Image: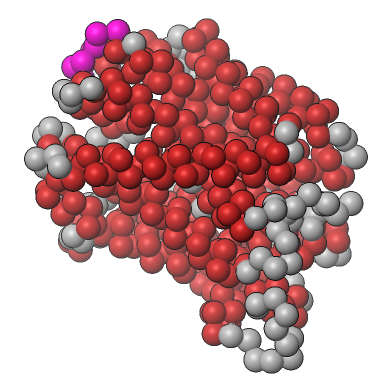
Amino acid sequence: MANNAKFTTRLGVIAATVGSAVGLGNIWRFPYEAGMHGGGAFLLIYVLFVLLIGVPVVAGEFVIGRYTGENVVGAFKKLKAAPLWHSVAYIGLLSSLLILGFYSVVAGWTLEYIYQAATGFGGAASQEALHAQFDSFTTSGGRQIFWTLLFLAINFFVISRGVQKGIERMSNILMPMLFAILFVFCVNSLFMPGATEGLAFLFHPDFSKIDVSTVLGAMGQAFFSLSVGMGVLMTYASYFSRSTRLISTSVTTAVLDTLVAVMAGVLIFPAVFSFGEAPAAGPRLVFEILPAIFATLPAGSLWAMLFFILLFVAALTSTISLSEVVIAWFVGEWRWSRGKATIVYGIAVALLSSLSSLSFGPLAGFSIFGMNFFDLLDFVSSNIMLPLGGLLIALYTGWKLPRRILRAQLSAPGRDPDAPSPLAVRLIIFSLRFICPLAILAIFLWGLLPH
């Protein structure tokens, strides 16, 4: 059953698709990945792979979604694809569940830290005190479950409102808010004493820092930050009108997603260098080091609150899109009402994420293949499901999808189908056929190796 719901404006299309891509990976993961891989060199390679891999695969998902107007399962049914390609849909559905199972826990941390910032972190200001505070929080069962479930309740409330009144309306509010808060932080960072050193680290490539891990790390960050391989963009594209230009929308999504990551770097690295911290501090940058830095600033609690609101907004827009993949499947294939689909899937995600939230506390001793429950969900989805889904999408759109469909969808609306394809269309098709499969396969194999 084809979708009747559509995004109503160009702003809605861009806000929703950029919101689906922008998440904690841009603001939380990108800075510490760049920090651990030499800054500018990592950024340069990351941008290159956004263009070479990200834009073509995003465009490929858009083509399937907009052409069929279906949920991920219905799309491959409508295309009469062989059974192998139907696995793309089920990989996307399972990825959504697994990612929400651990991602919602981290998203819940942002709510805890909005509260902590509002109350002055209980007087904790040093890194040691903030480290102890973070450990105390993550090992507590009840508090983590509370914030995780509260975050999910907000997420599924938006989803229950539908495509136009829920997803589009909320994206139109949250994405401008995210960019506004980021802009304020970036301006503030430029006036810090370590701004020059921090910006040089981020924008001046040191090619001696480049090795295999840098290249593959940047490739993986570019791939994962755009939310490809999980059916999100395919689902959202089913809500596009026929007048939506898919290539320009793909490029705009990739550019704005990359801009958020770069702005996060501009926000964080001047602060890190101003206070003598290591840029390679890793994930603790956000929940331990930055709060310590904010504590030294005038109105530090306000800055900390704004920062964690920023993280919350990024987390919410991406989890809304992840949830919509499965909700659209329930509505389209099972003929459920949106309300029923939201309740059933919300309960399933709540149970999984509650178990995940206990991985650092009551269930810390429980492991599968040497990983706790949280890390297992992260590993299976990030290292196996998403690269596999992305690889199959690239292969299907590049080699199996009828070329006339691919060219017609990628070309400007109303263009003569018999005219030669524009250069941009030819480049995207070439990348989908040759560059993307090889690059994604490299990411996939690298992700399976021990590091």
Instruction: Residue 401: give x, y in percent of width and height.
Output: 74, 72
Question: Total of numbered circles in the picture?
Answer: 0
Q: Nearer the viewer, residue 222 or 395?
A: 222
Residue 248 figure quarter: bottom right
In-image side of 56 versus 341 (left or right): left
Q: Residue 85 appears at what percent x and percent y?
A: 75, 59
Q: Hey, which residue is sitting farthest bottom in the picture?
A: 419
Check if residue 439 falls in the magenta segment. Answer: no
How far from the left and from the top, in percent, is residue 159? 69, 34
Q: Against 144, is 430 above or below?
A: below
Residue 99 can be seen, yes or no: no
- The part of the image, by quadrant, that contains residue 76 is bottom right
From this view, report whether residue 201 is shown above or below residue 124: below
Q: Quadrant of the C terminus?
A: top left
Relative height, residue 17 to residue 93 (above, below): below
Q: Residue at x 42, y 64 (%)?
A: 49
Does 439 sit above or below residue 70?
below
**Magenta region, residue range:** 122-129
Q: Is residue 432 visible?
A: yes
Question: Which residue is depicted at the point 46% across and 21% down?
Answer: 111
Q: Residue at x 54, y 34 (%)?
A: 316
The percent position of residue 169, horizontal first and vertical second, equals 63, 41
- Tell me the residue at 73%/61% (across/down): 241
In reply to whether residue 124 is colored magenta, the answer given is yes
Is 435 displayed left or right of 295 in the figure?
A: right
Display coloring: secondary structure
Main SS of the magenta segment?
helix
